[in-house]
Image (spheres, coloured by chain):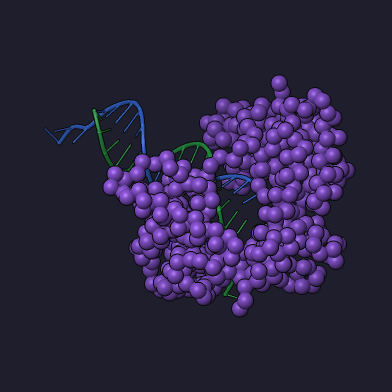
Chain colours: A purple, B green, C blue
Amino acid sequence: MSRVFALVDCNNFYASCEKLFRPDLANRAVVVLSNNDGCVVARSKEAKAMGIKMGVPVFQIRELLEKNNVVAFSSNYALYADMSARVMRTLEEMAPAVEVYSIDEAFLDLSGVASAVNLTEFGHQIRQRVQQWIGISVCVGIAPTKTLAKLANHGAKSWPKTGGVVDLTSKERQRKLMALLPVNEVWGIGARLTKRLEEMGIHTVLDLADAPTKLIRQQFSVVVERTVMELNGESCIELEDIPPTKKEIVSSRAFGERVSELAAMHEAVSEYVHRACKKLRQERCQAKRISVFLRTSPFSDHHLDPYYSNSRSAELSYPSDDTRDFLHVASKLLDAIWKDGFRYAKAGVMLSDFYANGVCQQDLFAKSDTVRGNSVLMGLMDQINEQMPNSLYFASKGTKQSWGMKRELLSPAFTTSWNALPKVR
DNA sequence: TCTGGGGTCCTAGGACCC
DNA sequence: TCTGGGGTCCTAGGACCC
């Protein structure tokens, strides 16, 4: 049976979420900023039309924003996650198998229904229903491989006359579209690979599709080879409708203000350990390895503000999900990499080497009741914090958190009861 | 002065073993 | 003085994604 995938992608997702609850902004240019209100991570179509680029630092375009009356929001991640879940539930009602690929995208497996429905019509039904039920507009790309479905979606977004749906199941249409698009539009081809491909005379997507796979394998890797096969309609990347278990959990953040004191850095690292361990318990996993990293700003003038970056990891003697085990080790790791005299811009922790709960062999000498006691305590702490966020934690993460992030333009928590209220300062 | 956060996969090279 | 070859495991780094 030939395969058919659809890629459904929300338009200007974060900006659309913000507009949804502010009808007064319907035709206004809206941007959403990253943590610390640092750079632009989402733009409404009006903001895109002004030439505001994705990822641009806010300080570089502040005048443009003010002159054009652009409305800016801090990231309200709880709102976007909630809206995302609603969109995904709607898609799950319409398709036999759905892979939630990112907060604003999902792959659908339509192989089974392809012969029974008109695919373009089905794409329009998806668009209509998500618009009507959730209020978010989406585009739909349909093709025999995920890589081509991504490309089809790009086409649907770029050309309004498609009505937001492109069906790329025919070979002729695939080649026509590929000839029009530059190679960097391909899923899996980033800036570095684009540069090297162009040096080889590969400029359009079609150039890449027609390149000999042998040459590609030899010059690059199996990943790029697979991409070429997918562009030729051979499905190599399966739908992952059951999310694979995580292999690592990272918690890190750029500081609202530079950190130069070891005590403040200990608080920050402690905060990240709390977050990471909470996620670990949600995943129902235990981890054995933890690493701590820190760095100064890579953007500043390094003569005035010297650069330093370091990380170190350590292994527990047994896998754990107990915050206290990791706090202890993280603190020692931080001391080992800390150097006085730098203005640190960012730090974080990473947990890795995961074991499913209960799978790992206990240390012969561990007291099993102690172990159970720990997990009960941690579970209780998570439960209480669920109802009253941030009410219970270990003292090491501090109470003032002067290094905490800036979110001065946050929208209210429209759809969730708590979370993300602006910090009182 | 001000530049995000959280992931995955692949590969090369070193350590170690026989 | 001479100083193999092959396998495995681990880690760091590079590339990509949203």
Q: On the rendered structure, is A308 left or right of A168?
A: left
The residue most toward the top is A1
Near-viewer residue (A7 or A285): A285
- At a point 47% along the width and 57% down the height, the residue shown is A378
Image height of A36 relative to A92, above or below: below
Instruction: Give the quarter of the image for residue A154.
Output: top right
| Residue that sits furthest to the right in the current view | A161
Name the quadrant containing residue A178. Answer: top right
Which quadrant is home to the N terminus of chain A?
Answer: top right
| Res. A383 in view | yes
Along the horizontal axis of the image, is A260 left or right of A158? left
Please give the count of numbered marks on the rendered protein.
0
**Which residue is painted at 72% across and 33% down in the image?**
A96
Placement of C12 over or under A403, stated as above or below: above
Q: Is residue A424 above or below residue A126?
A: below
Considering every residue shown, the one lying at the far front of the view is: A369
Measured as percent of width and height from the top left, residue A152 is found at: 76, 38
A325 left or right of A242? left
Task: Indicate the position of residue A310 as horizontal and vertical percent values.
Answer: 42, 60
Residue A416: % across, % down: 69, 60
Using residue A355 as the reference point, say whether residue A237 is left or right of it. Answer: right
The reply to whether residue A59 is visible in this rendering is no
Along the viewing direction, whichever of A302 and A201 lies nearer the viewer: A302
Residue lying farthest to the bottom in this orientation: A425
The x, y position of residue A273, in whole percent, is: 46, 60
- The picture quadrant where one finds residue C4 is top left
Give the residue drawn at x 72%, y 57%.
Answer: A14
- What is the quadrant of the C terminus of chain A in the image? bottom right
In the depicted view, which residue is nearer to us: A352 or C2? A352
